[in-house]
Image (spheres, rainbow, N blue to C red):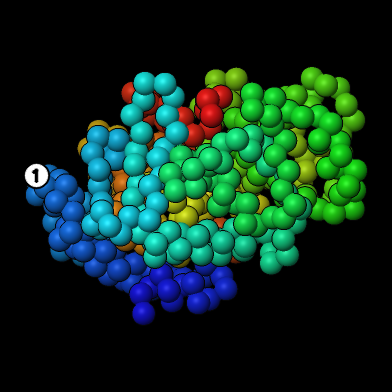
Amino acid sequence: MSLVKNILAQENPYKMDFAIKKIEFLKELKKLMNFHYNNSSEFRNFVSNSNYNLNVNHINELPFIPARLFKLMDLRSIPDETVFKVMTSSGTSGQAVSRIYLDKESSLIQTKVLSQIIGSFLGKKRRNMLIIDSQSIIKDRKKFNARAAGILGFSSFGKHHKYLLDDNLNLDIAELKIALEQNENNPLLIFGFTFLVWQQFYQCIQDSKIDINFPKDTILIHGGGWKRLHDSRVDNLRFKKSFNELGILKVHDYYGMIEQTGSIFVECEKGYLHCSDYSDIIARDELTLEALNFNEQGILQVLSLLPSSYPGNSILTEDIGTIIGEDDCKCGKKGKYFLVSGRMKQSEVRGCSDTRAV
């Protein structure tokens, strides 16, 4: 049985000790990356041309693909006839997009892992759900972009879904009022991409000057980047405080990318993003790309056990962050925990949430 299936068989995806993980995680990643080397000519050429070695003794030595490479070429390790789903990153006008190829098994595994990770925060009972987006974004279920994939992935954790934005991404205040009246005593699950949640939801509530109070124990989960909010001087602390004032006391950011769908990093109650047993993270020096110690800021490299149909197990992102520690977060979850501080200055702005384009 693979390591992924072993982790899926347990209830808690945050329980693997460092001493075990450093051995088993590396062993499984090497197996996956050798599979991609043998089945993806693009990945094989990249490894060979970069003088990388797959036979390494430490996770820090594993080769990594720059995230931008997914926008420049098709990277896959499966034949055409087994492609079940193609996911694309959402790009602003003129930007190239990543294309991620999944077979049926990969798609199923990603869905199960996402469910296990988010379920560890939400519990088993499904809540009525408010989605801060337009329903029109869910079009072709065989060809997802990042926002559509995120919405569909998180929709499984709720029921009686209500999309609160119209096709122009304007908040339907009347629909929000009805939802709150119908769920006066029922904790809600709210999901959306960070920029839309702030600008098209929170700010519209403020501008409308209506008295809004959400049910006790309502949970807000959001993700997708902070670039525009940082430009508006909105940080995570202000974001949380603003929603706390509306009665939403449980607010969780998450960090992830379309190239490693399912293997997301969710923010714990102490304010840190966490690696699950399926993932790991390394911070690297911006100039030398050497692996950094805890509490040193650098470019983030994300690692995941999930990609089996394409070589996305080890990706150097264009995000800057700091790994705080491992196995000792006060929230009780095992694994590395970290903070993301922004994007590299020369990188493109990701389009999955930082645009109003559907």
- 116 relative to 303 in the view: left or right: right
Q: Nearer the viewer, residue 55 or 94?
A: 94
Horizontal side of residue 220 vs 113, given as left or right: right
Give the amino acid type for the residue marked by disc 1 in the picture.
Answer: Asn
State the residue at coordinates (40%, 40%): 88
The answer to whether residue 3 is above or below residue 206 is below
Q: Nearer the viewer, residue 56 or 200?
A: 200
Residue at (29% x, 40% y) in the render? 70
| Residue 237, quarter of the rendered image | top right
Quick one: SS at disc 1? Answer: helix
Q: Is residue 180 above or below residue 101?
A: above
Residue 97 x, y percent position in the rendering: 36, 33
Can residue 23 be seen from the camera position used here? yes
State the image coordinates of residue 119 (x, y, percent, origin top left).
Answer: 62, 62
Q: Quadrant of the N terminus?
A: bottom left
Establish if 97 lies above or below 161.
Answer: above
Is disc 1 surrounded by few (<14), some (14 to 19) or many (20+) residues within 10 Å? few
Q: Position of residue 298 (x, y in %)?
A: 36, 38
Where residue 30 sits, quadrant-wise, is bottom left
Q: Is residue 334 visible?
A: no
- The number of numbered badges drawn on the structure is 1
Which residue sits at x=49%, y=72%?
Answer: 8
Q: Position of residue 173 (x, y in %)?
A: 81, 29
Q: Which residue is mark 1?
A: 49
- Check the image and name the residue furthest to the bottom: 1
Report the front residue among 120 and 204.
204
The answer to whether residue 103 is left or right of residue 183 is left
Say which residue appears at 15% left-offset and 61% top-offset: 38
Q: Quadrant of residue 305?
A: bottom left
